Image (spheres, rainbow, N blue to C red):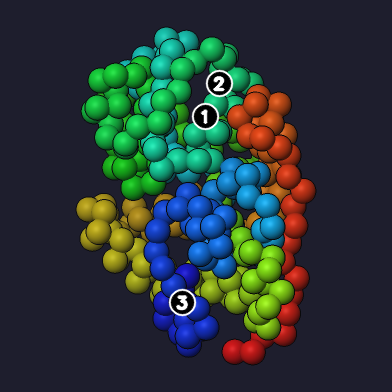
Amino acid sequence: MWDVEHTRVGDSFDVAYTSPSQCAAELQRGSADIGIIPSAAYTTIHGLSILPGVAIASRRAVRSILMVSRKPIDGIRTVALDSSSLTSGALVRVLFAKFWGGGRQFDSVPPNLDSMLASHDAALLIGDPALKVDRSQYRTWDLAEEWIHFTGKPFVFAFWAVREEAAKESNLDLAAIFVESRDHGLEPANLTHIAKIWASKLDLGEDDVRQYLTTNIHYYLDGPCLEGLQLFYRYAHECRVLPRVPELHFADARPALI
């Protein structure tokens, strides 16, 4: 979002901020044209194209997607899922079904660790709450790390998608705009700026936030990530977690007018 927030690129968009799952819902309703959506949502919404090259993915432990418990994996029978999760909720179901052993109960609840563990054997936390967990006090499983361990593939949590009707009406080279925005956001000075702001918001160390942004998150929808994404769709469909294995449609490049 760097260029959208800090340059004249933002003049071309009417920007609203919400969760990725809500972005997907707004694309489905047609109340938004572009959004960063959970990869799981792409299986349920027709008429979307992926903006190529850009993703929220991980090639190692991601830190912000955690299953937390006081029990070992074989003692977990019930799992509380963060109610804002789509892809991570699907991923934990796939990990149980394919690798840890099935037969677990999953319930979607608000993301409060204490209340989740009061009523369930394990809790799935995503985003900022996961980053702030004191992992020395619990057994934890980093879902990206577990996926990579079992499959050897990166995991793609989210990507930018555009409604195909809106893309046809636009003369903007959306793919180039978002790739360039990502690249500018990853420049050292801009990363320092982002880390300083979010360290204060999250009450985390600035170096810790910078390491998360530069080491744990992979921002490129490259060949290995596409392989991991397609494998996730296949496994999730086989496990009856997602409704279909979608064909990946990518937005065409267009001449930029800005």
Report which quarter residue 191 is drawn in.
bottom left
Query: Of discs 1 and 3, which sits in the foreground?
Result: 3
Q: Residue furthest top?
A: 75
Residue 90 seen from this side: yes
Residue 253 location, quadrant: bottom right
Q: Is residue 188 above or below residue 145?
A: below
Mark positioned earlier in the residue sequence (1 or 3):
3
Position of 34 compared to 105: left or right? right
Which residue position holds label 2?
Answer: 96
Q: What's the distance in space between the residues labelled 2 and 1, CA to CA?
A: 6 Å
Q: Quadrant of residue 150?
A: top right
Q: Which residue is mark 1?
A: 92
N-term-proximal mark, 3 vs 2: 3
Q: Residue at x 72, y 34 (%)?
A: 234
The residue type indicated by label 2 comes to Phe
* Lateral position of residue 11 relative to residue 174, left or right: left
| Disc 1 residue crowd, few under 14, some 14–19, many 20+, Cα 10 Å | many
Residue at x 57% of width, y 14% of height: 101
**Foreground residue among 89 and 56:** 89
Q: CA distance from mark 1 to mark 3?
A: 35 Å
Q: Secondary structure at mark 1?
A: helix
Residue 92 x, y percent position in the rendering: 52, 29
Label 3 sits on residue:
14
Taking depth in this image into account, of 229 and 136 the one nearest to the observer is 229
Relative height, residue 59 to residue 90 (above, below): below
Tell me the element at label 3. loop
How much space separates mark 3 and mark 2, taking CA atoms?
A: 41 Å
Q: Name the residue: 44% across, 57% down.
A: 213
The reply to whether discs 2 and 1 touch (Cβ–Cβ < 8 Å) is yes
